[in-house]
Amino acid sequence: MLLITVVVEAADEQQARAACDALISRTGAQVLDARDCSDEEPECWAVVITLPSAEKATHNVSAALARAVRTFVRGLGDGFPTPRVACEPPTAWTVLDEPELINGLVPGAERVLVEAWAGDDPFGAGTLRDNSPSRPS
């Protein structure tokens, strides 16, 4: 399961969600939450979207998590470089923080956090299925 958090400049929740429409349409994701984070920066919103991952973990959960993150980022377009991915199971993540690049997908976006989760995630939105023999499904 992927969780994508988009930090976007917006006046309100409706505007923040609307800014993510093209990304949601392109990926088939769904909005999970939108939160005002203007205590950090004025007119700052964090929109969290979720998307099931097609990755299956067989022997190496870390590799599957990292692959899920990289596959998602590569799917955003040709201009997106292969990201460095941090991994500490049950999650792997990367931050896209090139506004000029991500503004093409989400107008007003400052950065995007892409997380892949294996097993039960803390938000209850879904999972990346772990099929490894050492872990119960």
Image (cartoon, helix red, strand yellow):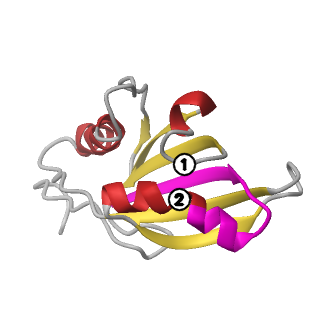
Residue at the extreme bottom of the image, as rendered: 124
What residue appears at the point 43 percent right and 54 percent down from the top-left corner? 23
Above or below, comparing residue 96 to residue 53 in the picture: above
Q: Is residue 6 magenta?
A: yes
Q: Residues within 10 Å of mark 2 (few under 14, many from 20)?
A: many
> Label 2 is placed on what type of residue?
Cys
Above or below, comparing residue 50 to residue 88 in the picture: below
Front one among 127 and 69: 69
In the rendered structure, find residue 106 and report the number of the disc placed on it.
1
What residue appears at the point 44 percent right and 56 percent down from the top-left corner? 22
Q: Is residue 98 magenta?
A: no
Picture coordinates of residue 104, whole percent (x, y):
50, 39
State how far apart marks 1 and 2 are (Cα): 5 Å
Verify CB contact (< 8 Å) between mark 1 and mark 2. yes
Question: What residue range appears in magenta?
Answer: 1-18
Of the numbered discs 1 and 2, the one sitting upstream in the chain is 2
In the rendered structure, find residue 87 and report the number of the disc placed on it.
none
Picture coordinates of residue 113, whole percent (x, y):
54, 45
> Label 1 is placed on what type of residue?
Val
Using the rendered image of the protein, determine whether residue 118 is visible from the camera's viewpoint: no
In the rendered structure, find residue 20 and report the number of the disc placed on it.
2
Picture coordinates of residue 79, whole percent (x, y):
38, 25
Above or below, comparing residue 96 to residue 19 in the picture: above
Residue 20 is left or right of residue 87, and the answer is right
| Secondary structure of residue under mark 2 | loop
What residue appears at the point 30 percent right and 40 percent down from the top-left corner? 62
Above or below, comparing residue 114 to residue 87 in the picture: below
Using the rendered image of the protein, determine whether residue 42 is visible from the camera's viewpoint: yes
